[in-house]
Image (cartoon, rainbow, N blue to C red):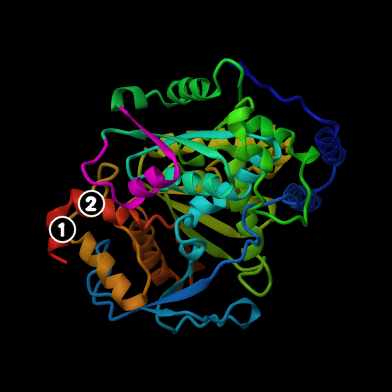
Amino acid sequence: MKLHRLPRHPPLLSLRNDFRSNTSQGASELKSHGEEFVTKLLDRRWTLLNPNTTIHQIKLSNMLHANESLDGISFSSNTHPSLGQDTADNSNQDPSFYMVRDDLLHPLVNGNKARKLDGLLPLVEDHSVTDVVTCGGCQSAHAAAVAVSCAERGLRSHLLLRGEQPEILTGYNMISTLYGNVKYVPRSLYAKREEMLIRHANLVAGNSGSVVWLSDLLETSFTTQTSGKPNLVQIDAHMNADSHRRKVAIINEGAADAVGLLGIIRLVQYLSQKHLFGKERTLKIVVDAGTGTTAVGLGLGALCFGLSWEVTAVMLADTVDGYRKKEKGLISDFKHSTAFHHIDHLLKGMDGGIVHWVERGRPRKFGNVLKGEVETCQQIAQQTGILVDPIYTLAAWELATLLSQEKAKGGAKVVMLHTGGTLGMFGLAQRYKSYFQAV
């Protein structure tokens, strides 16, 4: 097996040089060129035929008192809210927040999983990759999304799942097993993710194959991107991969790569259209944070398009220092891979970063469910028709509820991004039987 490194290409260098020629221009012009650069970057082939999504408005009532457990609050959903210039800004109305329903994008590949794969999978296809290796927890929505998406495109997926095989397959674990090639990895080996992924990719590639890095694919994407062509097209070469040398691409856990930011930024561009949230309105964007990639993508998109959007992420799997380190790393990788060096100028004066990382109302070890949270998810589902899970999306729902009360007192409008992942509830039902028996 040989490691396949891809060279830099003139189109990418040309775009970078064009942008560097404007270093002496003012802040407003810099912001304009930043938007122009990202617009060009987004002119590529995508997995999703369009970036459209559904937006609902969640209204709160009967607030006896506000706390993290949502006691005394009832919810209702407006499935056709007024947006754009028609949006009323009446502080006397009951508190509410908007819900971006990305959980409806695909029956199995939805939420931020679909967004992070939106720009990633076409790169994999365009560079004739035959196999994809990634990893995740036993009930990883990311691993399942990769498995389904690869199967739809005639690619082979190899999924390294942490821990032991459960006695009964269910939820995302079942989806991963049905669509991909699953291997369970002891926690001691999984702790060294990069080594684990590289080792397995080498095994898949064999002596005659090669392993490519997503960062390299992104750097060369300007030579292969073709807008306006049909997406979701299977490449014939992949269908007979057994008779060819294998080309293996590694996707980090949770698609925490610079490539994964592209689809999130595309979503920001869509939501900032005049008939939706527009570019002038001040918003508070709320999202749950596993790897933190989605939050960083939202922050980057808001920064590059000059939006007054404050991205707040509920930390679920790391400390604030850990997330800030990830934020800096992703921005650095994005800058290097896309040659967007002027992002440093846009970041000036933002010492706190582009994401506001906050603790969950009731902190706990990642993956744990507290008493009463399953009932809260049930309440939300029955009152709004929206399913959230107690590990990820309930955390964002709780924060959006609290922030919407500030909005009712004259604060910024609150928007929550539903990151999907609801099939994970099946796995939780096995692990927390007593909680679900009480439902």
Q: What element carries label 1?
A: helix
Image spot of residue 280 (x, y percent): 66, 67
| Quadrant of image for the N terminus | top right
Does 275 sit above or below residue 372? below
Of residue 338 and residue 69, the one placed in the foreground of this image is 338
Does 83 sit above or below residue 112? below
Q: Which residue is drawn at 27% across and 61% down?
A: 68
Task: Tell me if I can see residue 427 in this picture.
Answer: yes
Q: Residues within 10 Å of mark 2 (few under 14, many from 20)?
A: some
- Residues shaded magenta: 165-185
Amino acid found under the numbered disc labelled 1: Tyr
Which picture quadrant has residue 160?
A: top left
Amino acid found under the numbered disc labelled 2: Val
Task: Tell me if I can see residue 74 in this picture.
Answer: no
Q: Which residue is drawn at 21% across and 42% down?
A: 167
- Residue linked to disc 2: 369
Q: In the drawing, what numbered circle is on residue 30?
A: none
| Number of numbered markers | 2
Residue 52 in magenta? no
Image spot of residue 275 (x, y percent): 66, 75
Q: Are marks 1 and 2 in contact (CB under 8 Å)?
A: yes
Q: Earlier in the sequence, mark 1 or mark 2?
A: 2
Q: What element carries label 2?
A: loop
Q: How crowded is mark 1: few (under 14 residues within 10 Å), some or many (20 or more)?
A: some
Of residue 246 and residue 259, the one placed in the foreground of this image is 246
Which picture quadrant has residue 389?
A: bottom left
| Quadrant of image for the C terminus | bottom left
- Residue linked to disc 1: 435
Along the horizontal axis of the image, is 320 left or right of 81?
A: left
